[in-house]
Amino acid sequence: MRKSLLFFLSLSILNAPHVLAATEVTLEEIVVSANKIATPAAQTSTTVNLTDKEELETAQRHTLEEAVTQLPGVYSVTPGQPVSPNRIFIRGAPNRFSQIRYNDFPLRDPSSLNNDFGSFQNSLLLPPGGVERIEVLKGAQSTLYGSSAVGGVISIFPEKTWESGFHGNFRGAWGTYGAVEMGADFSYGDEKYYLRASPMYTSSEGFPDIPYQRQALALGAGARLSPADSLELDVYHTAGSQDNASSPSWDAALGKIIPQSPQDGRIDSDYTLAGLTYKRSFGDSWEARLKGSYSSGNREYIDPLYGDSAYKSDLYYTEMLHSLTPLEFLTLIAGADYEGMSAEMDNSYDSVDKFFNSGSFFAKAVLSFFEQRLNFDLGGRYNLYDHFDGAFVYNLGAAYAFDFGLRLYANTGTGYRTPSVYEMYGETYNFLGQKVHIGNTKLDPESSRSYEAGLEQKLLDDKISLGAAWFHTEIEDMITMNYTLLSPYYNVPGKTRNKGFEFSAGLAPHEKIRIHLAYLTLKAEEKTPGGWSEALSTPENRFTGTLLLYPFSGLSLAFTGRWQDKTRINVYDSFYNALEMRESGFFTLDLAAAYALDENVTFFGKVNNALDKKYTLDAYAMPGVTCSLGLKVGF
């Protein structure tokens, strides 16, 4: 049995001297996503969780889904791992209510169903060693981030290699189901310039017999034009191809669910983001930046049974941001942004070609008193559209940090999401011999209001960090459709809400041990004429944990566990009738390790689902135990 496999070696090249140096010094934690500028975490009034470069490397988390799924309040689904597009829920809010950003540029596909990044999330490979950290900002964040930031924002910050000299490495890994992973990373930096390039490639025969291949390239460059200003370039490109797979369905004759299986045809996709950031300092109290990006997405579905279809999108984005500190206790953040989105959709029955414009003005004031222990923030945004009426959103928060390491915080805010091109103009389908058009140009934007209160306690010189938060988010004018009849999209009357608690703990009992624990209890409900009732949701209870060990020089180990209880899901029969079911809970364990033979050669490997647990996600069968082995050579 594959259960007898032991864990192998991980992708990190960390060695004990480096780890010891990192744990002997306690640095003030800085976050960027909360205010779009570097802010001490103790002064923020909202929950921001992050995973850093060390943990990403040690635990071999090479995709966005792997990077965030262990964080408190975050739940990700990669059904059929990893063939189907994955979905990331922040406190129960699905993909379309969460923004994903790369160095604060939006990752978005305007031709997707919900104007989100779901079609490309499963091909977003993270360059090992090339990501400084990933931050997850929770709650309604439309004040600074605009549409879709209803549940939160996931920010990927690539590493900048100023003054690092020249470094490079090659790596390769081979594993179960014919999996191949190849990559390289090159960087150079001095006091005036930096360059970085990370090509990546992965392929597999797939589970179950559904092959795929992906490649990606991350580029970064920066130049300090003077002591006061700098210019940076970011490029991220990903492309891939995968065979078609059927969705799970209910077989009434057999009385059971039939999981996914290979089908004729394939899906080809590619996505490119290119962005420039210009920053200038006008002294100690005034900084400004100008950002601009262009992104393009292409998806082509080759389907011999239902016909081919193609989707193409373009997104133009610009932002001007100013940060001013006119008084010692006051920081003002103000700016404006613009988005131009085009979407083209073609299938056998219909074609759509639309362009949307939107612009916004936003501002936020941060006030700090009593040596920055008491902090308040208040912000607002006014949005202008070419398809909808203008709208105003706001946020208000407060936090207090005590001398003994306790921080209390609370906030409230509003958010919104404008309907996507697909939801408004849709496509025409052949449904049981009839043509059905599912677009609805009379849709209203979805709106939300969120509340949060939490605390964080640090003990023993930050060797112990404990956190707890209560949250409550209500959404109005939810957009949905009747999938049974493939009727047009419509706004659901009433409200839906997600509420619950999340708890977290970070422990460093020894310089060679790090532990991260997280627990989420969530209740999703919808309001009907009969009152509030349970809604289809993520698991009501979920626990995750990561143990990082550095037993001796050159060796690093990672143990990652996940438990979740039952989940309510819908499964469709051959006539598109929905059957509501409860999916069983499960526990999985992933293992990773690495051994650095010397400063240039590292052996690594990983075992996923080491207990060979048989389980499903959204009724998609998931693979049992899988493993990989590899080698990394640096210079």
Image (tube, grey):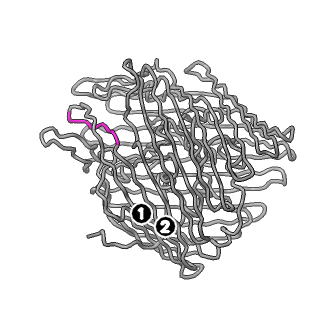
Q: Amino acid at mark 2?
A: Ala
Number of disc labels? 2
Image quarter in which the N terminus is found: bottom left
Label 2: element kind: strand
Badge number at residue 558: 2
Which residue is rendered at x = 70% and y = 62% of the image? 26
Q: Which of these two is toward me, 335 or 433?
A: 335
Q: Is there a contact, CB below 8 Å, between mark 1 and mark 2?
A: yes
Farthest-out residue, front: 404
Q: Which of these two is toward me, 353 or 415?
A: 415
Counting other residues with Cα less than 10 Å from the Cα at mark 1, is it few (<14), some (14-19), or many (20 or more)? Answer: many
Badge number at residue 572: none
- Marks 1 and 2, Cα distance to the nearest angstrom? 8 Å
Question: Main SS type for the magenta part?
Answer: strand
Which residue is rendered at x = 32% and y = 60% of the image? 205
**Residue 120 placement (x, y as % from top left):** 46, 46
Q: Is residue 287 above or below residue 495?
A: below
> To which residue does mark 1 refer?
590
Say if the magenta span includes residue 308: no
Figure quadrant of residue 400 = top right
Q: Amino acid at mark 1?
A: Asp
Q: What's drawn in magenta, residue-wise?
A: 567-574
Answer whether residue 242 is visible to the viewer in this image: yes
Figure quadrant of residue 479 = top left
